[in-house]
Amino acid sequence: MNFNGDEFKMKIDLLIKNAKIIDGTSNPWYYGSLAVEGDEIVEVIRDNDPENLKKYEAAKIIDAQNKFLSPGFIDVHSHSDFVFFLDSDAQSKLRQGVTTEVIGNCGISGAPYNELSADQVKSFTYGFEAEWESPEEFLTALAAVEKTVNLTPLLGHGTLRAYVMGMDNREATSAELKKMQEILAQALDLGYRGMSTGLYFSPGNFADQSELIALAEVISSKNGVLTSHIRDEGVKSIGFINAVKEIIEIAEKAEVSLEISHLKAFGPDVWGSSREVLDLIEKARERGLEVTADQYPYLATGGLMASDVLPNEFLSNKSNQEAMTELKQESVRAELRDIVALNIKRRGGAENQIIANYPADHSLEGMTLKEIADSWDVEPVDALFKMLTEYLAGDWISRALNEDDVVNFMQYYASMVSSDGVSLSNSGVLASGNPHPRNYGSYTEVLSKYVRDKKILNLEEAVRKMTSLPAQKFNLKNRGLIEQNKIADLVIFDLDQIKSPTFSNPDFYPQGISAVIVNGKIAVLDSEYQEVKAGKLILS
């Protein structure tokens, strides 16, 4: 304290005054100020009480000018496992208000890493070649690198399976299953939040229920979370409804907390099924299963071209290079042609498939599959075959969702907001491709489109889905709420001024996010990045 005339003043690092505080509980906003010292909120001052404000001597003062102040947004479904090793600025999540990312989703994680799992994670490495192998070595490397946001990891089941078994389409032996269980248990003891599955992708889709239950029981024993990109979100394999039933059954048998990842009804064949799916989830909750879901707020998805159209049976037991080589054979393409054409149709047709990232020919990025086929004077299925023979790990954007379903999932009380994206930058090595705007604007899209414009959610409920609900689900202690002694991960935004990226302009940083504070440090101020990397690796 400093003696100043007749008063003692408490020195603090930051004072945010004149804010409309949304505390993350879904309670109505109120006028107030925050005092921050180090990485903690030391006091919440109601009504900007001048007597309370006078007792602080702040190194930095932010006048919020009656903008909204909320906890930092927590992205529960991120794929930023590798990008901070390439560009530690990686601002796309930070600049939309995200202060914490849960990485390692869809069964794809930074570790365990070897020559068998390298193909499985390739689409999210952005060309980075890892030098670690074990989950512990990955955590050591991740802790050492500078980060703009906090990261907390999941272990990917697909990566784990590929590390132990490669891409084999078969049941795990008892020895292989035991090894997977041991690696998972070690990861959980190191502080991983749980395990993710990508049952839609190879090799995750080769696992039977007994394998998944055995691994989920390990998670349950360590009080972790099972997250799942379910086996089918449309009609590609077992069907959307059956896939939801399957993952609920696995979670109930293992008695594990379940998060259904990026919940959506994919493709015209399953549009209108959201009510039935939510009824399945709610009935499971009534039976005592702790099941929640997350969702990104768009009518178009992002996916991997090969996994989206090629049959699982074709991809099994093959590396990317082996699959590309086989696809060059006319007899193989002829055998696959009908099912690949059908899968393109199920996704809304060639005119609704937009190439996002295709390193073999960046000039194709941003074009639809139909435009490419027309320019080559071939059928869309043949254009896609040609592309896959040159690069199998490309990804695209598919306009394949229905807004009624999106809204139904969004309004469900046990669903939260996510991006299914990556921390990118709109310049440098992480700026390539034609990215889905979710990487830059999932949270501002909810605030601008579904809160302000369409009034689908009220503001306080939307913020709860971005803050305290994710923190509760993933046991992120001391985050997700504006309260005394909580960590100062904070966002100041002007709801009226928010402008989010679009599909035609997907990689611009949103407008209306005035300030972002990460662990008490000002990372964005007056909507400008401050070259501050205060993110931490958060382990349970």
Image: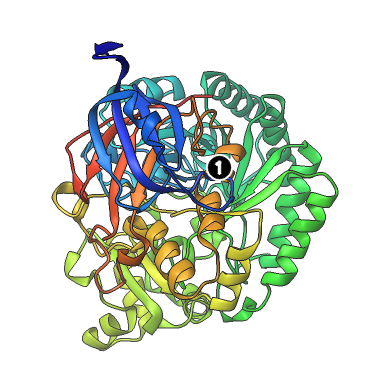
The location of residue 124, given as percent across then percent down, is 35, 47
Q: Quadrant of residue 368?
A: bottom left
| Residue occupied by mark 1 | 468
User: In the rendered image, is residue 392 in sight?
Assistant: no
- Give 51 or 135, whichever is nearer the viewer: 51
Residue 333 in the figure: left or right of residue 263: left
Foreground pick, 140 / 361: 140
Secondary structure category for the residue under label 1: helix
Residue 455 rendering spot, x and y as whole percentages: 52, 72
Q: Going 77% across and 64% down the picture, which residue do you hit?
A: 279
Q: Is residue 218 above or below residue 491?
A: above
Task: Kindly indicate the quadrant of the structure image that contains residue 512.
Answer: bottom left
Quadrant occupied by the N terminus:
top left
The residue under the point 72% across, 37% down is 256
Image height check: is 12 above or below 393? Answer: above
Q: Quick check: 144 above or below 352?
A: above
In this view of the protein, can residue 308 be seen by the observer? Answer: yes
Q: Residue 216's x, y, as percent?
A: 69, 36
